[in-house]
Image (cartoon, rainbow, N blue to C red):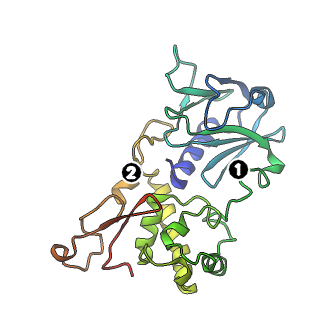
Amino acid sequence: MPELPEVETIKNAIAKGIGNAFIKEVIVRNSNLRQKVPADLPRKVCKAKIKTYQRLAKYIVINLDNGISLVWHMGMSGKISLLEKKPDCWEKHDHVVIVTTNGIIVYNDPRRFGLFTYCKTDNLAQSGLFERCGVDPFGIELSDEYLFEKLQKKKKIPIKLALLDQSIIAGIGNIYASEILYEARISPLRLAVNITKAECACLIEKTKFVLQKAIKAGGSTLRDYKKPDGSLGYFQNQHCVYNKTGQRCPDCICNIDKTGGIKKIIQGGRSTFYCESLQK
């Protein structure tokens, strides 16, 4: 599933390629996504002008001049293509097509776990999609006091799972949680309630560092993820621990023959990677 850096990359690419165009037509070729695409969506957004683009958590939001916002989630396998004109034939899993005065946006999703809907712009924060979301990793609301207070309420939850809790910080996914904890030198096994306020400040610093670095690299290319121009992100080449079981970490201080290198464990049904020599 595309995580925050991938979603930010996709959003930026659409904004650059399409800009403040007018929506001429919306073609819903298959409405059966995670939630059904609203039947009246084409009527609601056609002839409207795109005002701004934003990312909320792991969603792309396109705000229009008629007070409506398109809300988009890529799901597990969703991808976006930007075209200059309609192709002779659509690909099998091209489910939603947005024709604008400055190009065409195509949403393709083989597994159909994504979401494509709309909401009144003024009601975004109160909508069911966002009302339980925590603060953004780059928002001013994310402070060491805020994070410390939230973690104190997670009595029996490991810090890795707390970072994945979207009601605390919205947007951190599994890949980047492992990378953030490595940079912060904090073991994913430690209970969230035992993280100090100083460590919270470190976690916030490293969260921004890892995510900004990943955005600059165009995200991590794992499984189905591609940027809208068809190219691949390359942050996976900069992973320190994720998917590197048995390898040395970049700042290795241990005898790898004795320690076995980077460890892989399962937490909450998700893979976690860490260096037990550096992360305490």
Furthest residue toward top:
88
Q: How many marks?
A: 2
Q: Is residue 137 left or right of residue 279?
A: right
The image quadrant that residue 260 belongs to is bottom left
| Mark positioned earlier in the residue sequence (2 or 1) | 1
Q: Please identify, in this view, whether the residue under mark 2 or under mark 1 is nearer the observer.
A: 1
Q: CA distance from mark 2 to mark 1?
A: 30 Å
Q: Residues within 10 Å of mark 1 (few under 14, many from 20)?
A: some
The residue at 57%/21% (across/down) is 85
Disc 1 marks a residue whose amino acid type is: Leu
Furthest residue toward front:
156
Please state the horizontal and vertical placement of residue 163, each as a whole percent of the image.
Answer: 54, 67
Furthest residue toward left:
257
State the mark number for residue 60.
none
The image quadrant that residue 148 belongs to is bottom right
- Residue at mark 1: 129
Please state the horizontal and vertical placement of residue 123, each as a whole percent of the image.
Answer: 82, 50
The residue at 55%/43% (across/down) is 75
- In the foreground, 142 or 209: 142
Q: Is residue 122 left or right of residue 41?
A: right
- Residue at mark 2: 234
- In the foreground, 202 or 156: 156
Q: Residues within 10 Å of mark 2 (few under 14, many from 20)?
A: some
Please state the horizontal and vertical placement of residue 156, each as a whole percent of the image.
Answer: 54, 76
Disc 2 marks a residue whose amino acid type is: Tyr
Q: Is residue 89 above or below residue 100?
A: above
Classify mark 1: helix, strand or loop.
loop
The residue at 55%/34% (across/down) is 112
Q: Is residue 124 above or below residue 200?
A: above
Classify mark 2: helix, strand or loop.
loop
